[in-house]
Image (cartoon, rainbow, N blue to C red):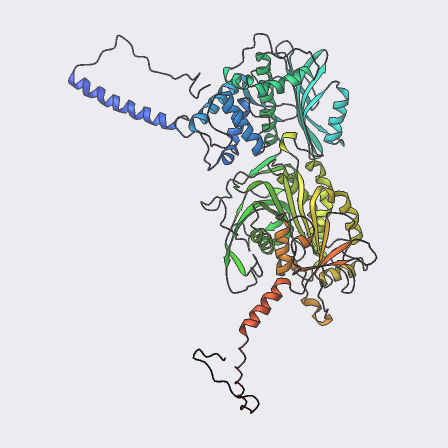
Amino acid sequence: MQPDAARHYWTPQISASWSPVVIAGERLHMRHIASFFACVCTVVALLSPTARAACPEGEDLDIQLRDKEVQRQLILSGFLAAEIGRANEKMLRTSIADFRAANSLPGTDEAILTEAECDTLKHNNNAVYAFIGFKQVINPVNQLKMTFPAGLLPPEAKPSTETWQEYENPKVSRVGIDVFRVSGRESSTNSFSRGYQSYGALTLTYLHNSGSEVIAEGAGNRWGSRYFFHNMNFEYQGGQRGIYIRFDMRPPEGFVPPPEILPAARLEKIKKQIAKLYTAGINGAPIPSENEIAWSLIARAVFNIVASDFYDQNGWRELTTKNCVFGSQRRARRGGVRIVFATTRGVANKDGDMSTMFGNTASDRITFGCVQVNPRFSVARDTTYRGAWRGGARAANSRIRLLSEPIDRSTENYVRIIDTAAAEDATHALLVIHGYNNSFLEAVQAAARIAGGADYKGRVYMFSWPSVSRSLRYLQDVDNAEEAEGSLQAFLAAMLRDNNIRTLDIVAHSMGSQQLMRVLGSIRTILDGRRHEEGTLRLGQVVFAAPDVSAAVFNTKILTWAKLAQRVTIYTSGGDWVLWLSSLLRGLNDRAGGHTPWGEPLSVNASNVYVVDKTPPEYDFWKFFTYTHADYVDDKVILNDIQTVITGLPAGDPSHRDPHGKRFKALPYKGVHGKRYWATLPEGPMAEAKEAVQEGLKPAPPAASPAPAAPPTAQQPAVPPTATGTTR
């Protein structure tokens, strides 16, 4: 269908009995009326939606497709089979390519949307929306809100005193909807499993199970008829909320599909998808007609629109990063970092900057925001950005914005973060979790140093728990870190609900490593909960810097999930006084990131886990408190190695990153055959640089005086020089 096909334009009808007025005064009067009428028409035209730009702003197609209205239009046009905000860039590009192919429009899956294409999508959206007859309703019993397809099913629920309400009228419609709000000790997973077992011959086209949330879509066979279904339920404040929608595969009598849905229904790829559900894979089963395919697309549009709105209407919050664009640049200049963060710190000054907005006390609310840090290189080494970016630098042009007002932590599990502003590689994300004795400012600086120095191409996230930021408040930090674990888990889930992310890299320091170890098991279901066409979600580079975790616990837990990661790197030290004190407070319980100066670092029996140890070569007890717990940002060798590790290249053990052996030395574990760890050389390449500088500054030795020539002897007469200065 061409952009303006099937459009109806209103044109004014002029009566044949009307004739121009010839009287001069009346002609002048009519001229004023005509001018006024022209002004009114101009204003109306400017206010008309068709007069404004139909396409969202964006420098490339991916940015345009992050617009929620465009996704809604693609759903109602029949080309997008996903809820709003859940489709990744690959699925959205495919839907645009299908839209262009079905409508015989030029353009690849990379060309930005034209005004004509956006106008067509908007027209299709309005036509199909009107056909379905969506209206907003509130269930009078359970008070749940929903976008209801009133054009297909009367919005009157069956009489019931329960919180499970049914909308069904077989005499009028082949559509049924259940909306429920139940209290109980049953999980969403168990609830769906019981329902799945009670229905026979189900064909699942999609199943998402994150433990507290289940979405299932497919077809079934019950009471002698085939039907499509969409089930969605999630745990919310001690109970479950959800909807169950079913469409009989047979369209109602007299069904005439809106013409705007037919281009999708005639696309060969979509016809095959629908036919597979109709026939349930049975050879010889009848192929659905065009009307039946169109009815299936109507059902799919209802599923995705109703489910998309149900989240936002009943407790969920979607946060977008659309206001996280600092300046006109698509990306911060090289070395600059844009960080999306979550913190359970209390807000000390809502109008403050990166150093004053958040305090060091715990809050009953979680705050989401973004900050951009651009580097300013300097010869001077200061405490703000000491050792950053492979050279001295400090924070400059740091700006911070909140994505929303702080959210009550009782609802923190019902948040979804959609990165609509990022121009970075959407498939990769880096999460940085700070450790003991860190302020919010220091945590942001650490994340910026790591990601900025690596020129990390993906998105950067940071979680900040309320460390007291005092050296002698270690035990209070232990409690605060443990108390914030639930919020870290909620932040991870909110991040990974953005289905563009395919690889998650993590850097955890000190107590942050303990938080990470405790929550990683719970996100296993999220890692495995993607659609087939969305691709798998896996851990990439996982870095533990000075992990303040029991060595025995660490060794046990890491074996259960290390196989999910591409590589795990652990940085240890025999001179970390913080981990020494931690071990002492726990009855000399060994810590994963520390050991005695004369001992060996942690040994992990996993093929993709590598240990890098930075123990002072000559330990001096009197310098006990000068050995740092923050080598991951204070020591250039460790910082630069972490920056290299998170890029993923080169793969394998540290020797691949140091082929000439200038930074690391492989050492065998005593009594463990074939197992090695890598010790850092005293200062690695920095020592070489210092030696070169020192050599260059040394004064040149004085020139030696030539020795006097020996007098000629009788046996050996002097040889006179030639004209060229040489001797014969």
Count of marks placed on residues: 0
Q: Quadrant of residue 186?
A: top right
Image location of residue 295, percent across then percent down = 59, 15
Q: Can residue 561 be seen here?
A: yes
Image location of residue 275, percent across then percent down = 63, 16
Of 241 and 225, nearer the camera is 225
Q: Quadrant of residue 153?
A: top right
Of 109 and 399, nearer the camera is 109
Q: Is residue 663 left or right of residue 50?
A: right
Q: Is residue 24 left or right of residue 502?
A: left
Q: Can residue 178 be seen here?
A: no
The relative height of residue 81 versus residue 567 in the rendered view (above or below) is above
The relative height of residue 719 versus residue 351 in the rendered view (above or below) is below
Looking at this view, name the residue that lies furthest to the front.
715
Q: Residue at x 53, y 16 (%)?
A: 262
Image location of residue 167, percent across then percent down = 64, 17
Of 616 and 319, nearer the camera is 616
Image location of residue 624, percent across then percent down = 71, 68
The relative height of residue 279 versus residue 386 in the rendered view (above or below) is above
Q: Is residue 617 left or right of residue 296?
A: right
Looking at this view, name the residue that lies furthest to the left.
24
Looking at this view, name the residue that lies furthest to the right.
671
Q: Residue at x 52, y 65 (%)?
A: 380
